[in-house]
Image (cartoon, rainbow, N blue to C red):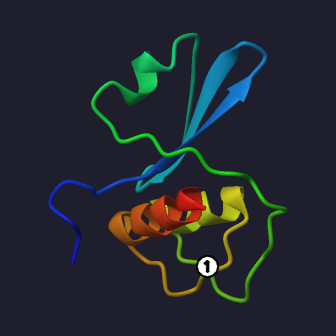
Amino acid sequence: MLHPEIKHCYVVIPHDGQWLALGKSTDGIELMVVGNISDVVENDILIKSQVHRPKRGLFMLNTCVGYTKQVLGINKPFIWTPYQLYRYLEKQNVG
C-alpha cells in the first residue's frame, strides 16, 4: 500500500535559528533539533506548507501521516499514506 519511494513523513519547523524535526514512529514521538536544514532533509523531499490552526477530528490514525496532519492542521480524513499527503501538499503549493 505504501509508495516505493515515499514511506514516511515528518514535520520540519524553524525555531530560534534552528530546525525542529517532529515525527511519529512505532517507538513513539521523534524529535530532533539541528542547526542546518540539510542535516534533516539531505536525501528527502521537502515541501513547504502553511500551518493552519490545528483541528482535532473525530478520528486520527496513530501514524506518521496522522501526526503530521494534526501538526499542520490538515483535516482530510482520507489521506492515509505519506504519498497521499505528499500529493495533497503539492496541490496546495501550486496556487
Up-down relation of residue 46 to residue 64 (above or below): above
Residue 30, percent across and down?
Answer: 53, 40
Residue 91, percent across and down?
Answer: 50, 66
Q: Is residue 24 left or right of residue 20?
A: left
Up-down relation of residue 47 to residue 54 (above or below): above
Q: Quadrant of residue 43?
A: top left
Q: Quadrant of the N terminus?
A: bottom left
Residue 19, percent across and down?
Answer: 62, 23
Task: Name the residue carrying label 1.
Answer: 60
Furthest toward the right, the residue is: 53
Residue 28 in sight:
no
Q: How many circles with numbers are drawn on the protein?
A: 1
Mark 1 lies on a secondary structure that is loop
Residue 51, percent across and down?
Answer: 74, 53
Label 1 crowd (10 A; few <14 / some 14-19 / many >=20): some
Furthest toward the front, the residue is: 95
Q: Is residue 41 left or right of residue 20?
A: left
Furthest toward the left, the residue is: 4
Q: Quadrant of residue 41?
A: top left
Residue drawn 53% across the image and 70% down it: 62
Residue drawn 49% across the image and 69% down it: 88
Q: Quadrant of the C terminus?
A: bottom right
Residue type beneath disc 1: Met
Residue drawn 79% across the image and 60% down it: 52
Up-down relation of residue 5 to residue 33 (above or below): below
Residue drawn 33% across the image and 24% down it: 42
Residue 78 in sight:
yes
